[in-house]
Amino acid sequence: MEVNKLYIIAEKQGVKVDRFLLKDNLSVSVKYNDSLFVGIDNDLSGAKEKVCLAHELGHCATSSFYNIYSPFDIREKHEKKADRWAIKKLVPKTLFTKALKSGYDNVYLLAEYFGVTTDFMQKAVDLYIAV
């Protein structure tokens, strides 16, 4: 999936996406009242932009927002839920399986094939191939 399609998904879901300088993060998503917002760092492009945007849209699509002030909220649970949504959008299991059968047999080749980062592809491999 190309990054422009992710921006279209955001628009259709009513998610406002803005690009600006982010000091400590590459991207961020926020739910405020009934509105959803995603911020993407100005310097992001290519695979990083695609992966970050998909991940933040995953937070929005699955309502996986955590409360930093609550000692009972588990951040990792929300992050994994957002990652799973992003993986299923950017690396659908059927295409992943076809790529493996076509000889894309390592994380680096798979990442290049799907146009994602190697870290993100490792998460897809972990999701689809039981370790």
Image (spheres, grey):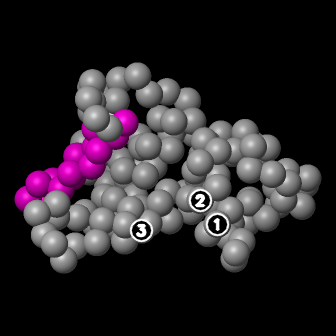
Q: Name the residue under label 1.
A: 126
Residue at x 21%, y 51% (from the top left corner): 30
Residue at x 50%, y 65% (from the top left corner): 84
Q: Give the range drawn in magenta.
A: 26-39
Is mark 2 in CB contact (under 8 Å) with mark 1?
A: yes
Q: Mark 3 points at which residue?
A: 81
- What SS does tag 3 mark? helix
Q: Which mark is residue 123?
A: 2
Earlier residue among tags 3 and 1: 3
Mark 1 closeness class: few <14, some 14–19, many ≥20 residues within 10 Å? few
Q: What residue type is labelled 1?
A: Asp
Answer with left or right where residue 117 lies relative to residue 86.
Answer: right
Q: What residue type is labelled 2?
A: Lys
In the rendered image, the vertical position of residue 93 relative to residue 53, given as above or below? below
Q: Does 35 appear in magenta?
A: yes
- Magenta: main secondary structure equals strand
Answer with left or right where residue 86 lies relative to residue 127.
Answer: left
Q: Position of residue 5 (x, y in %)?
A: 50, 42
Q: Which amino acid does label 3 sit on?
A: Lys
Residue at x 70%, y 75% (from the top left corner): 131
